[in-house]
Image (tube, rainbow, N blue to C red):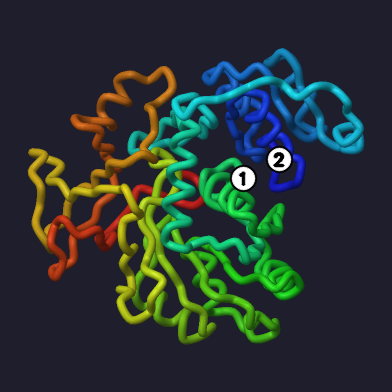
Amino acid sequence: MLPNCIDFALAWYGALRAGTWVVPINPLYTPAEMETQIRDSGARYVVTVPECAAALDAVVDHVFVTGGSWNKIVQCSATAPSVRSSVEDLAVMPYSSGTTGKPKGVMLTHGNILSNLRQVYAVELLRREDVMVSMAPLYHVTGLISFLTGLLGIGATIVLMRRFDLERWLALSERYRATFLFGPPPVVLAVTKSPLWGKFRLDGLKSMGCGAAPLGADLHKEFELHTGVFLRQGFGLTEATAATSIAPNDRTIQKFGGCGYLLPSCEARVVDPADGRDLGSGETGEIWLRGPNIMKGYWNQPEATAQTLVADGWLRTGDIGYWPLWCAKRAAHWTPRSSSSTWPHE
């Protein structure tokens, strides 16, 4: 339960290395909200900031407070734990409201995470030479899996911002010569309408990603005209680990307002929610997904799991979209019409 900081990264990798699994909690929650999530998940330990420690001391076995000297880690001579996690073992359990509005623990395995990272690497959304200033919250899969784990996993560089401020975000991107940015539509709008963009030297930028809510074609075009930066819109959800589709890394074939092509090993259907019938090009319906990045299920929620994970491994997303008219159903491309997702919660 931490803001974006180096402590989060150390706790995340340390917990996985020790064979535990992690329940990330929004540090802006009230003590009651924090306690609800802790008790529901069965978490035994909390790593948090000093100001939250007292409120949680009676809820878990032990509270670890940040702010100490990390030299103790460097100087530690103890033998590393002998742990070998399997692809089916739980790695992280973020909470998502999904389509019902009631937060549920989403069980994501080591295999889910590794699959999703390899899918993202395959379409060159992230590259080894990338530098990114990230304000995406680490308690959310976008910040934690796609960017912290994704960038470090490929040997790239991430600079963490604790909270979003447009001018500081741009200043840090200039200072560290960022090559890639990410923001939800409200950030895209802020950049497009603000005069701040021209005050910073951002000539190293190769592209910017956008997700978490639909981005309209008009704003998409206006952003690119204002900044000169190639914008790649994507689609994903917590139940699919993070990303499931991304616009191609090619301006000549991208569709403004669309959320791109499916990542490798992902499948999609557009289904009539009333009768489960597959719909044709141009017909609006519910998006169903299948692939190695799909969650194991909801924690202690068998009924919700059964309603969301249906026959043959398909995930009902609750999001609405359609196949473009030129696109055969086997092609991996759709355009979002509306979404149940809001930033940074889903």
**Residue at the spot 43% in from the left edge and 22% down from the top edge:** 299
Marks counted in the figure total 2
Crowding at dot 2, Cα within 10 Å, few <14 / some 14-19 / many 20+, comes out as many
Q: Are marks 2 and 1 in contact (CB under 8 Å)?
A: yes
Q: Secondary structure at mark 2?
A: helix
Q: Quadrant of the C terminus?
A: top left
Q: Quadrant of the N terminus?
A: top right
Measured as percent of width and height from the top left, residue 46 is found at: 70, 25
Measured as percent of width and height from the top left, residue 227 is found at: 54, 83
Q: Decide if residue 281 is on the left or right side of residue 303.
A: left
Q: Is residue 128 above or below residue 199?
A: above
Q: CA distance from mark 2 to mark 1?
A: 8 Å
Amino acid bearing label 2: Phe
Which residue is disc 2 drawn over? 8
Q: Decide if residue 59 is on the left or right side of residue 50.
A: left
Crowding at dot 1, Cα within 10 Å, few <14 / some 14-19 / many 20+, comes out as many
- Front-most of residues 332 and 165: 332
Measured as percent of width and height from the top left, residue 72 is found at: 90, 32
**Residue at the spot 42% in from the left edge and 51% down from the top edge:** 119
Q: Secondary structure at mark 1?
A: loop
Q: Is residue 187 above or below residue 103?
A: below
Amino acid bearing label 1: Leu
Label 2 or label 1, whichever comes before in sequence order: 2
**Residue at the spot 52% in from the left edge and 44% down from the top edge:** 141
Which residue is disc 1 drawn over? 138
- Front-most of residues 315 and 183: 315
Measured as percent of width and height from the top left, residue 151 is found at: 60, 54
Q: Which mark is residue 194?
A: none
- Front-most of residues 181 and 91: 91
Image quadrant of residue 329? bottom left
